[in-house]
Amino acid sequence: MQPSNSGDVRYDDPWYDALASGWGASADAGVPPARREKVAVAAADVYLEVQRSEAFQEVRSRYRRFVLPAVALFFAWYVAYVVTATTVPEWMARPVAGAVNVGMLAGLGQFLTTFLLTWAYVRHARLRRDRAALELRWDAQELARGRGGAT
Amino acid sequence: MTGDHHVPALLLFGAFVAVTLGITTWVSRHRRGSAEEFYAGGRLFSPMENGFALAGDYMSAASFLGISGLIVLVGYDGMLYAVGFLVAWLVVLFLVAELVRNCGRFTLADVVAARMRERPVRIAAGTSSVTVSVLYLVAQMVGAGSLVALLLGGTGEAARTWTVIGVGALMVIYVSLGGMRATTWIQIVKAVLLLGGTVALTVLVLLRFHGDINRLLLTAAERSGHGEAFLAPGLAHGGDWTARFDFISLGLALVLGTAGLPHILSRFYTVPTARAARRSVVWAIGLIGGFYLMTIVLGFGAAAVVGPDAVRASSASGNTAVPLLALDLGGGAGSTGGTVLFAVVAAVAFATILAVVAGVTLASSASVAHDLYASLRRRRGEPRSEVAVARLAAVGIGVVAIALGLLARDLNVAFLVGLAFAVAASANLPVLLYSLFWRGFTTRGAVWAVYGGLIPAVVLVLLSPVVSGSPEALFPGVDFQLFPLQNPGLVSIPLGFLAGWLGTVTSAEVPDAARHAETEVRSLTGAGAA
């Protein structure tokens, strides 16, 4: 869609419905449709503004700096496991202790890394991202509300 | 298996059906008929409740009975499935759950349509979501028919037909009357029952071997007749290179498909915030991981206690391994303990199927009403009427699933679950990831990504050995097989990503920076989330 088209935002766009309900009845009850449209347009500018803000860029890069390497890591480890198990099974059959062989350890290792990465992700999100994201959320909604009231 | 241990199993089936119908009526007491209530259960579930429901939606009878059965028959290679099913949740946790919760309302198409021209994108994403759901549903229906017949001994045609019709009717009642709220509670009850049953059996297996896992594995290897090879990969997928590539293809579909399953995605909308969505995935990973670890113990346990020969004699696919194990652990056929444990396992398997089909039906009725109906019909109705359409769609999907389930009842449809995952990974995941992460993604790219994954996946399966040209095929009499692999994922998943990229770079459309900003800010902060 061309940027210039953003003026004719339709009401059936899910986001603008969501905005109307998300802001609570006090802000929007009884607002005539034409006015609500202007609110939505102003809100779009708010998002561009927030996106350019330093605080948002920080949250985004913290998220990406954790998630992208983590995805690359577990995906490579999983593909390596599946490819090794199917192409060189004899390598996985090498005994380690008793009935336990390399394959068993690798399979349990997949479970273990899944649990560990889950824990690491949650910890990272809680300590490094949640507070800043919540502040940005309120800022964006405050800004949007301010614009809505001004138009 | 003789007739006397079927009576308690039937009583437990009946009790589960009564409880779930009770939940449905109780939940729909104060029904107001809003879309929020029908599709998302009012968004007020706690992370723990939603985590159990996610686990309930995901742990199908195919995992409970199928993976253990495979382990009994082919040893280590059965374990590979469990690993794929679990690791897939990291994709969900890292890339999908929170972001989708923040930018969508009810369906996958919401997330994509927010940035794009709504109509074509909704039609595309709605079509692929319904396709995935129907494939999954038919597999479950056919499975339900043969499973109940197998567990109850009545392999007669009539028993299977009525089981398929009964399961279909029940899932329609749950979904159309109770919506997401009833479906979620049914999932929670089912997850608790399934985990309870699995824990009990695992403890009994470990007690039988005095906690000595080494001896358990050695006994299993010895009884299998394969020796040490039973505990290493290769028995199922180690043959020719086609078999090896086939498993790699399935492995990719499993790990990437989960994040594109409509009934999993719609669960994230039942909690109030993205943080709650994250915590519900953590619960789900814990429960599902524990469940699959126990499934592996049960598989090797059944191989050691029951033995592959007895299992194969009862069902060629190994699906009866866990029920037979339960019978043995309880004291053998004819004993009270054996009868009770067998009944519990049979009832849990039945509950599992009912809950899974209800979840899938709800998700597909949401795709039909919220995406397809809303876009194909220009006049925008009140939200109330959309819910009415969704209830009707649930009935329609129920009828289609029953019809297909009956038609396919004698066919070997085990490949359908793998296919559903492959379609989800090829058609739904690329468009979802591009929309969330790629600034330059356009409407044409989105539409191409969906059809560019969906069409190759379906066409490759039609040309594969599961449809024609092999003795186990759907139509063994004819041969139009061109594609060697049973699972299309290895080819169709890259094609889906490629098509999305190609559609984007060839389109003249300038991506809307403001709407991209909106997606990005909303997805990471939750601003303006429903």
Image (spheres, rainbow, N blue to C red):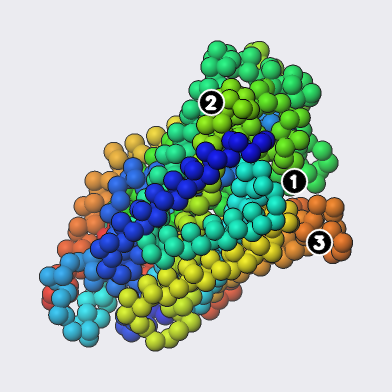
Kindly identify which residue carries mark 1.
B245
Q: Residue at x 27, y 68 (%)?
A: B32
Residue B148 picture location, percent across and down:
61, 47
Foreground residue among B210 and A44? B210
Question: Who comes first in sequence, dot 2 or dot 3?
Answer: 2
- Please tell me whether mark 3 sits on a helix, a strand or a loop: loop
Q: From where the camera sits, is residue B297 visible?
A: no
Q: To which chain does the residue with label 3 belong?
A: B
- Please tell me whether mark 1 sits on a helix, a strand or a loop: helix
> Is the residue marked by circle 3 packed among few (<14), some (14-19), or many (20+) residues within 10 Å?
some
Q: Answer with the quarter of the image where residue B345 lies.
A: top right
Question: Who comes first in sequence, dot 1 or dot 3?
Answer: 1
> Is the residue marked by circle 2 packed among few (<14), some (14-19), or many (20+) residues within 10 Å?
some
Question: Who comes first in sequence, dot 1 or dot 2?
Answer: 1
The amino acid on which the numbered mark 3 sits, given as a three-letter code, is Phe
Point out the image quarter for the C terminus of chain B: bottom left
Task: Work out how far the residue at label 1 is from the one at label 2, CA to CA, in angstroms.
Answer: 44 Å
Point out the image quarter for the N terminus of chain B: top right
Q: Residue at x 44, y 42 (%)?
A: B191
Residue B136 picture location, percent across and down:
58, 57
Q: Is residue B301 left or right of residue A147?
A: right
- Please tell me whether mark 2 sits on a helix, a strand or a loop: helix
Mark closer to the observer (1, 3): 3
Kindly identify which residue carries mark 3.
B475
